[in-house]
Image (spheres, helix red, strand yellow):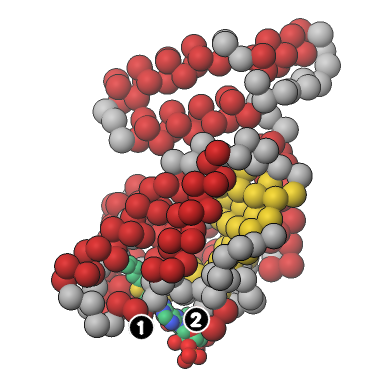
Amino acid sequence: MSQYTNLLFEVKDSIGMITLHRPKALNALNTELLQELSNLLDRIKEDTSIGIVILTGSGEKAFVAGADIAEMQTLTAIEGRNFGKIGQDVFNKLESLPQPVIAAINGFALGGGCELAMACDIRIASEKAKFGQPEVSLGITPGFGGTQRLPRLVGKGRGKELIYTGDIIDAGEAYRIGLVNKVAAPDELMNAAKAMAEKILSRASVAVQLSKAAVNEGLNMDLASGIAYEAEVFGLCFATEDQKEGMTAFVEKRKANFSGK
Ligand code: HXC
């Protein structure tokens, strides 16, 4: 189980389950929690027994209610930049983890919480979840990647509206604008996340991880460079046993039995 103060972590059936656990502050992200998450991600990256990660918040109310306002209250400009950078680095690490990450958003995902969810590959929200970037109401901008990831996910106009107004939207609206992939009843949330995780785990894992890298790296490049990158990862697949197995199984009209090699 867990050796962290602000996180719970367990691995079951190749799924790494991270639960952000700071109940007295609705799982708000302070420096200690961010450092623990960073350390845990370093561990997960090296652990080939973990094929996929689910990230959720503890308690009924919140996924993450934002960065820790009490910690930020007295920061100087330099300290603020450094705090933002800590979160940005952890979220970049999460986004570039080789394994896919599903956010199971059980409640409030505000500010840094929404930014954390956006650094995951796939977002599944409880009907009770609420989303927003309320930073301008506190006199700050989003600082854990929100000004960049939100417009990339929902488009520039909708992203700017959410950031400028600080409006809080419900799960249905988040689904409508493409901020979340799926909405589930609160008591079905974890089943929905696990079902998605199991489906992905049943596929060829190297191909899934190379697909993730191609999408992520490609979005940071011009189209021609991204297409060239895709050709390289596509070619790499033919060096895997799973490519042989996947195509042989198709030709033999049977289910593929992937080894992850
Ligand atoms: C620190 C927080 C917190 C936060 C909640 N708490 N959010 N502490 N940082 N972001 C604490 C409260 O102070 C309170 O502590 C306890 O959690 C329960 O919260 P309540 O407000 O009593 O709960 P409720 O009335 O149900 O309201 C829930 C809520 C509200 C709507 C989510 O807590 C809220 O508005 N939180 C702040 C949301 C926000 O503005 N997030 C963006 C932060 S800025 P006590 O001790 O009183 O019980 C950000 C910037 C990211 O994220 C980039 C940084 C670089």
Q: Which residue is mark 2?
A: 25
Q: Is residue 159 above or below residue 135?
A: above
Residue sitting nearer the eye, 57 or 228: 57
Q: Position of residue 16 (x, y in %)?
A: 65, 49
Name the residue at 57% across, 11% down.
239
Relative to residue 256, is residue 236 drawn left or right?
left
Q: Classify mark 1: helix, strand or loop.
A: helix
Relative to residue 198, is residue 46 drawn left or right?
left
Assign ligand 1 to one image quadrant.
bottom left
Residue reaching furthest to the front: 3
- Quarter occupied by residue 71: bottom left
Relative to residue 160, is residue 217 drawn left or right?
right
Residue sitting nearer the eye, 92 or 9: 9
Q: Is residue 136 above or below residue 202?
A: below
Relative to residue 83, is residue 100 drawn left or right?
right
Residue type beneath disc 1:
Ala
| In the image, the residue with mark 1 has its CB under 8 Å from the nearest atom of ligand 1 | yes
Q: Is residue 37 above or below residue 62?
A: above
Name the residue at 63% across, 29% down.
205
Q: Position of residue 147 (x, y in %)?
A: 28, 57
Q: Classify mark 2: helix, strand or loop.
A: helix
Distance in Å between CA atoms under marks 1 and 2: 10 Å
Name the residue at 29% across, 63% down.
84
Name the residue at 57% across, 10% down.
238
Q: In what quadrant of the picture does the N terminus appear? A: bottom right
Q: Which residue is mark 1?
A: 70
| In the image, the residue with mark 2 has its CB under 8 Å from the nearest atom of ligand 1 | yes
How many residues crowd around disc 2 within 10 Å: few (fewer than 14), some, or many (20 or more)? some
Residue 242 tag number:
none
- Mark 1–mark 2 CB contact (< 8 Å): yes
